[in-house]
Amino acid sequence: MIKKNIIYIFSYLTILVGFYFNEDVLGGSRGDYQYHVKFIELFSSDVILGLKKYGYEGYFARNSPIFYIILSKLNEIFSLNQIRLINTLGSVLIAIIFYKTLKIQFNNVNKENLKLLSCILFLSPTVRSLSIWPYPILWALIFFLISIYFFIRFKNSRYNNNKFFYISLIGLILSSYLHYNFACFAIFYFFKFYQKRGIDLEIVKALILCFILSIPAVFFIFFRGEIHVFHGPSGFPVEFKDLINISNKILIISSIISIYFVFYYNYKQFIQEPYQNIKNNKHHLLLLIPFFVLIFFFNYPVTENFGGGIVFKFSNKITNNNLLFYLFTLYSLILIFTHLSQKDNFIIFCILILFYNIQFTIYIKYYDPLIYFLLFFLFDTKLNKKLFISKYYLEKIYSFCVLMYCFFIFKNNFNI
């Protein structure tokens, strides 16, 4: 048993080493944790009173309170440092569930290779940092991945096994209670259910289940005097039109997503792909029209905080403007449009992108490692076939992950 899972044991040891040295690859996870400790203390004395104060002056937050309530109860048994140590087990859990999901999605691929592939999550800046510094997104990702596992079993079932669909919905609901943003994936699930089954009694029952279970969250978010999810970042006032600026979201998020396409290509292919796409599909030039509209309304602030993605930060650091960012984003949109060329896939992908990040700030931690889950499991793209037919696909994806890890270390040291 130990021999079979030695890769997970070794990978987890790297997390424990990071825990010992207080590693923070993302750069802001330690500060976020230290800020959120007061929420654990808030719920330690009285949960009901804590819920009344949570999200208001002195206790402002856009996250769900569920995670901090759970930690407050654990804090009655363990110290905060012991809770942090327990939290590191999340890295192992998410990697193992990732492997189980890969195994049913790609059942013709060597299982040992899939096990090695699943361990890329131990190099994920988000998984590493949020395993060491507790934050709800990690555990929301775990429940979301469980949800995907059962959704794939439902999709692949020869019979209409609704049990798998209901379990996948419950996993998604638990994920959403930990981090609101995951609720948008219900749109995807019900769309795929409709494609497979059409409208019947089961889809109505599933909708009613989701509605009933969402009532507490909807009440908490929207009917407490203020909609805290739509606030700007603390100390940085923004108008409502800026909070919902679609241009900011589409341009920045597409630039973040396309970076994760790198490991599917060699260097030459990655550079030539946009040119070949336009050459073979002249109608892709029509993307220039909405692209220039998006540029016109783009107004995301350049700060040392508030995210914005790798390319956005580099563009402003190197050229002191958005020119490189705009060029790369045009490339990104062409790439995404090409690989999601089925009309329904492209439309639903865009909808999810917009609703998944409803707040003003856009951080890469919201998309790493979520993008792996979208590319490998939820969207039928040309990329997965391209990846697994490559003899050296594991070397390519690990090289990419190491480069990403090194980039974050470099970013934190040089304040990029």
Image (spheres, rainbow, N blue to C red):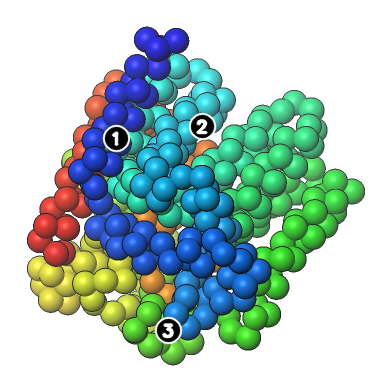
Q: Give the number of the mark in front: 3 or 1.
A: 1
In what element is the residue under mark 3? helix
Q: Residue at x 51, y 67 (%)?
A: 42
Tell me the amino acid under the disc marked 3: Asp
Q: CA distance from mark 1 to mark 2?
A: 20 Å
Q: Looking at the picture, how far across and down is residue 27, in whole percent?
A: 24, 58
Q: Is residue 268 above or below residue 259?
A: above
In what element is the residue under mark 2? helix
- Left-right relation of 409 to 397: left
Total residue callouts:
3
Mark 1 surroundings within 10 Å by alpha-carbon count, few (fewer than 14), some (14 through 19), many (20 or more)? some
Dot label at residue 242: 3
52 vs 130, nearest the viewer: 52
Residue 238 placement: quadrant: bottom left
Specify the quadrant that holds the C terminus.
Answer: bottom left
Q: Are marks 3 and 1 in contact (CB under 8 Å)?
A: no
Q: Is residue 116 above or below residue 262?
A: above
- N-terminal of the pair, mark 2 or mark 3, is 2
Q: Is residue 175 above or below residue 163?
A: below
Dot label at residue 16: 1
Tell me the amino acid under the disc marked 2: Ile
Q: Residue at x 79, y 60 (%)?
A: 212
Mark 2 surroundings within 10 Å by alpha-carbon count, few (fewer than 14), some (14 through 19), many (20 or more)? some
Q: Which residue is mark 2?
A: 97
Q: Is residue 377 above or below residue 309?
A: above
- N-terminal of the pair, mark 3 or mark 1, is 1
Q: Residue at x 41, y 22 (%)?
A: 115
Q: Is residue 257 visible?
A: no
Tell me the amino acid under the disc marked 1: Leu
